[in-house]
Image (spheres, coloured by chain):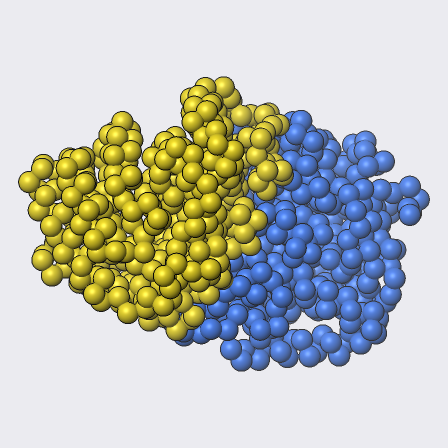
Chain colours: A blue, B yellow
């Protein structure tokens, strides 16, 4: 199967309202959509081996270009067979471009027309990331999906600053596309920005669509704005992106955010929440989050979530996880990571089933109610 | 199968010189011997889930009475089904008695005739461990094999101090045996002490043998003495313990120590080395230890040990593990733990095969030479 020779493309099997379900085809295999990609920042999911990720039915892992370029360097990753082989995963991968670090490392970088200068957060040496260099690094890393370098401004910047930033992001997108030499084996996705301004979001979606990328991301979301604004801008932006291409909402989010964004027509997600929260002993359940360090779990012989089929829920109790959490044992975060990742992936399976069943709106309402019920 | 109604007993299938191979029967299953027990101090092997331990063919886990009595408390472990169920393991378990903490927490305890008073290392409250209380705690924890409370003196103590300590250990052993109420489902092992004095080791072995325990440990080894002394005293002591009962060398040791101790007739081992070394990026190979943080592993596409069948060696390269180690990524120690534990368990499989083949002396010589070769 192929679509105009693209190595990465979306096959839409079913729609329900604006929600879509199907498969994302990549050179390393096909992933069912809507899809949650598990974050492996430095080419490692903190807490899970590839075998455990496969058991949890993870399909795509996401690694970070900025971090890998610094350590171990893209040449080392390339020498060792590219990202998927390097981390023993052998499945599909996506790399972000370093654009997010323009936001998250704001004090350590300077944005110029040509690119962005980072004072590397490890040793202070300079990393000069241009749109061309970001593509070149990702080509060496050999992910299936590369992302254009974009400028990700904080949500609270004013209209003039966002407009200026958008012009830069669009110029960089054009340069990235021109630099891309591996269209036979890697896709390059464009990233629409525009913060909370609908007209700028529209301008960005249109400008990028004209550049004809194999996929499109919505960037600049979950960078300081509130939930309502996230929902509004995603609902506004997603339908403006080409309907036959994958739509990827970067860095989002909570189970609730994902449920709402699928309704807007988003196909792909990633977020550090399931893994990062686990390291703070926070576990996701169908009735909301719980912190397993809490004293109320003393003697609680139930699994984290009685409806869950993960290795943690099949093996150990909340009381046991409380014990490990109180002690700060390594395995506390590992067990909770195993659960949280499976929780997210299972949510996507349920979402997909609901789209196929044609009752997504009802599913979304019920699931949001359940998540808000906080019964346990 | 049973031996005089004991729930835990050793079946010796083959001997080769003093080396023995067979099976240790317990209420939670049978473990092939010679046996390495993986350390799960606080009811958790740092870095591996029970499923991963089963894949590595671990058979018995060892947890620590002192630590579990403090947190979460033996009543909580008991309420949650006992140690094996608590940690989702469901296989055989052994608990030490707290005697080792008399050595390792020497500044926080006072030994009396009645027992040992610990200033709990968490909050300073007192834990008064008597031989009877140590048995009671282990009965609540419900391990398959309990250990008598003993006094473990430092190897460098003088003869008079060791002699005095031995009298106490023997009195405590007698009291522990009298306190033991679960002989239908739990075994209680005696612990022979005597430091580096052969006459005291003999006295201890004889005294404990008369008490007729279901199994015997050699304690007070690897507490500050050098390798030669360890080998000498183990070779001297092991044959003095009843030949039809399991012999357990506590807390030992390196692969070399284990190979030599099996030749002396030891059946059971435990040690923190495979798990603790992993957290310092040290991996065991057939040619000795390597530190994966070392720069020389840059670009090294080989697995940790080309002869190994563990998940790490089947999945990732030394170069990848160096990358994770340099970053201090959680998964560096997890991957190396997976390897080191399998390395130890595979060593035991090889040891056992050599005993069955009747060429243990040759096997031991070759393996010791290989471990000393340091070729990689």
The image position of residue B56, as x and y in percent, is 54, 46
Q: Is residue A147 left or right of residue A121?
A: right
Q: Residue at x 82, y 49 (%)?
A: A25
Q: Image height check: is A272 above or below A94?
A: below
- Residue A220 lies in what quarter of the image? bottom right
Q: Residue at x 71, y 52 (%)?
A: A59
Judging depth in this view, the residue of A351 and B8 nearest the camera is B8
Q: Is residue A148 visible?
A: no
How many discs appear? 0
The image position of residue B318, as x and y in percent, is 56, 30
Farthest residue, direction left: B160
Q: Is residue B112 visible?
A: yes
Q: Is residue A131 left or right of residue A20?
A: left
Q: Residue at x 16, y 43 (%)?
A: B203
Q: Is residue B327 left or right of residue B41?
A: right
Farthest residue, direction front: B4
The image position of residue B10, as x and y in percent, is 40, 51
- Residue A349 lies in what quarter of the image? bottom right
Q: Residue at x 25, y 34 (%)?
A: B236
The image position of residue B85, as x and y in percent, is 46, 65
- Residue B146 lies in what quarter of the image? bottom left
Judging depth in this view, the residue of A192 and B211 nearest the camera is B211
Judging depth in this view, the residue of A14 and B375 nearest the camera is B375
Judging depth in this view, the residue of B273 and A34 nearest the camera is B273
């Amino acid at each position: 199967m192929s679509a105009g020779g693209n190595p990465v493309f979306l096959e839409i099997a079913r729609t329900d309202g604006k929600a879509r379900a199907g498969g994302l085809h990549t050179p390393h295999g096909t992933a069912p959509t809507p899809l949650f990609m598990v974050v492996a920042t430095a080419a490692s999911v903190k807490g899970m081996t590839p075998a455990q990720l496969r058991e949890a039915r993870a399909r795509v892992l996401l690694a970070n270009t900025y971090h890998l370029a610094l350590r171990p360097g893209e040449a080392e990753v390339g020498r060792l067979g590219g990202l998927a082989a390097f981390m023993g995963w052998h499945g599909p991968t996506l790399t972000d471009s370093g654009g997010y670090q323009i936001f998250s490392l704001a004090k350590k970088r300077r944005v110029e027309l040509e690119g962005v200068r980072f004072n590397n957060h490890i040793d202070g040496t300079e990393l000069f990331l241009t749109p061309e260099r970001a593509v070149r690094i990702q080509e060496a890393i050999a992910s299936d999906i590369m992302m254009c370098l974009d400028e990700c401004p904080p949500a609270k910047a004013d209209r003039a600053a966002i407009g200026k930033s958008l012009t830069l992001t669009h110029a960089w997108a054009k340069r990235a596309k021109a630099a891309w030499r591996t269209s036979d084996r890697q896709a390059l996705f464009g990233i629409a920005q525009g913060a909370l301004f609908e007209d700028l979001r529209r301008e960005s979606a249109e400008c990028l669509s004209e550049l004809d990328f194999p996929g499109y991301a919505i960037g600049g979301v979950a960078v300081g704005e509130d939930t309502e604004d996230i929902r509004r801008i995603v609902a506004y932006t997603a339908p403006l992106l080409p309907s036959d291409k994958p739509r990827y909402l970067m860095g989002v989010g909570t189970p609730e955010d994902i449920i709402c964004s699928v309704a807007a027509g988003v196909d792909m997600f990633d977020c550090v929440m399931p893994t990062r929260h686990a390291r703070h002993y926070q576990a996701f359940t169908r009735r909301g989050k719980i912190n397993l360090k809490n004293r109320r779990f003393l003697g609680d012989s139930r699994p984290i979530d009685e409806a869950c089929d993960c290795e943690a829920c099949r093996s150990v109790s909340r009381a046991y996880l409380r014990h490990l959490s109180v002690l700060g044992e390594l395995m506390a975060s590992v067990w909770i990571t195993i659960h949280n990742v499976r929780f997210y992936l299972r949510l996507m399976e349920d979402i997909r089933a609901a789209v196929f069943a044609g009752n997504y709106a009802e599913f979304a309402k019920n699931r949001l109610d359940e998540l808000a019920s906080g019964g346990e």
